[in-house]
Amino acid sequence: MTFSKKILAWYSENKRSLPWRNTTDPYNIWLSEIMLQQTRVVQGTPYYLKFIQQFPTVYDLANASEEKVLKLWQGLGYYSRARNLHFTAKTIVEKYHGKFPDSYDELVKLKGVGDYTASAIASISYNRPEPVVDGNVYRVLSRYFGVDIPINESKGIKYFKNLARKVLSTENIRDYNQGIMEFGAIQCTPKRPLCVSCPLNRTCIAFQTNNIDRYPVKLKKTKLRKRFFNYLVVLDEDGNTHLIKRSGKDIWQNLYEFPLLETREEIGVKEVKQRLSDILTLEEPHLVYEASEKTVIHKLSHQHLYTKFWIVKTSDRLANGLSHIELEKYPVPVLIAEFIKTLKNSYF
């Protein structure tokens, strides 16, 4: 039995029941694939169901406000995916009259759609013989064939794409592509793969040479960047506060946050008071103190945010101040959302 037939046989017996597997509609497939980038299935599934409920068609998504899309996406991370999702929905409606392109070459031109997503949509929705290569596929192929070319350099990306094309099943591309990804997700896992029960173990080079942990090979990661965030949570006498919309090409673009003082290192209350006027325009007197003595370390893919929240109480009445109920309407990073819960319990 060939490699692809073994994958298909395994998939027919072991595939999970997932909501996007009940359809070949390209809108559903596209939505699920974008959501599952950098996200585990168990985390992404509730978001997929919420989006399908709120935006059952690409027209509904295209016509929604960006804030509503970002709010629904809140907590899923990598927010550029949500912004690209919204932009592409508009493109599908305006340029393609609501119908997704049916070829890889056209799909890959869409914003936020790379090689993997274009291949997934083309194969699952349109039965095109396009191989998918995601993290799971890299792992399965590198272990089975014993390939030690780094998967995160151009040579490796090209090599594995060609290898994936050579071994795919053109007879049942839909199930094969989903099958090899599923195989990597629940059989050939990153840690503690189920090698003993694996239908490929007799011909798997990594297993036969006892080198499972060696594959796949990756170049060293980019050095982590440390940033120090001091959020100034202004509270007036009515208990109102305010948020500011993030802009620019930084993390969390177009999400909301409290006024931010970013510093090169951790600072104390004295330094915060000295620099308060750089960020806020408040009349004296006002009271400044730390909301919690604990620094919150928020970990992103290439940077760690060392974060403190500072309560700034003022006798000023905030123009356009937000009550604790209104705060919940705005799309915010998880870091801010968690603090808002604390704020509601402690100060309102």
Image: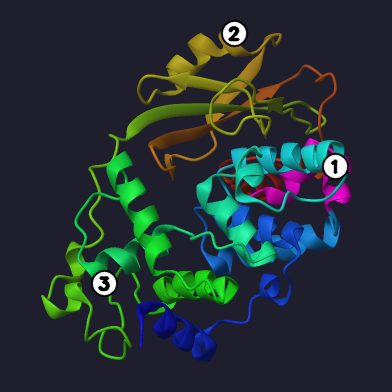
Residue 138's image quarter? bottom left
Which residue corresponds to the image point at 35% horizontal and 31% vertical from the top-left?
226
Q: Which residue is mark 1?
A: 93
Nearer mark to the viewer, of 2 and 1: 1
In this image, 300 relative to 211: left or right? Answer: right
Percent across and percent down for residue 311 are 60, 30
Q: Which residue is mark 3?
A: 144
Does the magenta run of residues contain 309?
A: no
- Residue lying furthest left: 209
Where disc 3 sits, the SS reads: helix
- Which of marks 1 and 2 precedes in the sequence? 1
Q: Which residue is mark 2?
A: 277
In this image, 132 relative to 219: left or right? Answer: right
Disc 2 marks a residue whose amino acid type is Ser
- Which of marks 3 and 1 precedes in the sequence? 1
Q: Tell me the CA gap for discs 2 and 1.
A: 46 Å
Q: Is residue 108 above or below residue 198?
A: above
* Label 3, residues with CA under 10 Å away: few <14, some 14-19, many ≥20: many
Which residue corresponds to the image point at 39% horizontal and 36% vertical from the top-left?
303
Q: Is residue 174 visible?
A: yes
In this image, 131 relative to 89: left or right? Answer: left
In this image, 24 relative to 162: left or right? Answer: right
Q: Is residue 62 above or below residue 8?
A: above
Disc 3 marks a residue whose amino acid type is Tyr
Disc number for residue 44:
none
In terms of depth relative to the viewer, which is nearer, 52 or 270?
52
State which region is magenta: 58-75
